[in-house]
Amino acid sequence: MNKSQDYQLTIVVPVYNEEDNIYALEQKLSAFLPLSLCKACVLFVNDGSKDRSPERIREVCDRNEHFFYMDLSRNAGLSAAMKAGIDHAYSDYVGYMDADLQTTPEDFNLLLKDIGSYQLVIGIRADRKDSFFKNFQSKIANGFRRMMTNDGVQDTGCPLKVLHTDYAKRIPFFTGMHRFLPALIQLQNGRVQQVPVRHFPRVAGVSKYNLWNRLISPFMDCFAYRWMKKRYINYQVGDNNLGS
């Protein structure tokens, strides 16, 4: 039996070489779980880390009954880690946050207030604490993405999201998919809500992003999305006798 089915929300936390953040994540997440608007657990997805992240993840899972983990056999990237987490979540909802703690799990409750009426609730980073150059790159990439996808989302890169798990499992995953979650939910005729959340400077670890994967690669992915959108299959099942 998959243990996540005992919860309403599974918080997926992809981890790649974040050993200096694991104990802080434990503190923040363990403090949030008793306050969550629905019964929640945490699923760390170790994306082939080469530092001490795997050992520290196991350590914090051993002493927190609502913490779980899974390892990818090699580093496969953020989209793959998110897909793995979603594939192995059997709660009603699946949440996502980064391991860098530039957002706080406390703000999941801001998103959960609307999850009953929307299939995806996504944060908007208010008063971003990134450098001018990083913010400038994100502004350009977000503007181009909105033009190409018409998703109407202000900040798709915000690493704080909650989705209905059944919708999340139907998302066509591909490298770079994490940038298009709102548009991919809309392809399923799902509704998307945006909610302001807090943003903090990174205090430990090193950013995995650079000019290529923050600006150039997203431009290329937008064209891949446009190609896929024209060929996307969306169906709904009516009557059947297969059973549950």
Image (tube, rainbow, N blue to C red):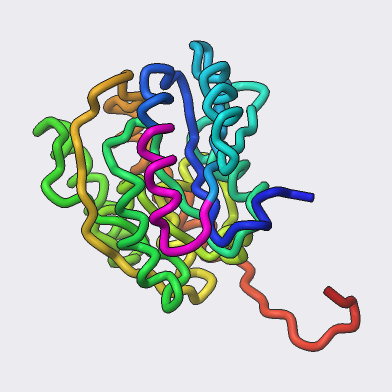
| Residue with the most extreme top position | 51
| Residue with the most extreme bottom position | 239
Towards the viewer: 135 or 65: 65
Towards the viewer: 173 or 131: 131
Counting from the top left corner in percent of width and height, residue 198 is at 20, 49
Say how many tags the image has: 0
Residue shown at the point (41%, 41%) measured from the top left: 29
Q: Quarter-wise, where is residue 193 in the image?
A: bottom left
Query: Magenta part of the protein: which range?
Result: 26-40
Q: In this view, does 3 lie to the left or right of 135?
A: right
Residue 33 magenta: yes
Query: Up-down: is 200 above or below 3?
Result: above
Residue shown at the point (31%, 35%) measured from the top left: 101
Residue 29 magenta: yes
Query: Up-down: is 224 above or below 119?
Result: above
Secondary structure mainly formed by the magenta segment: helix
Counting from the top left corner in percent of width and height, residue 155 is at 26, 53
Counting from the top left corner in percent of width and height, residue 244 is at 83, 73
Towards the viewer: 119 or 219: 119
Q: Is residue 66 left or right of residue 120?
A: right
Residue shown at the point (89%, 76%) measured from the top left: 242
Query: Up-down: is 158 above or below 26?
Result: below
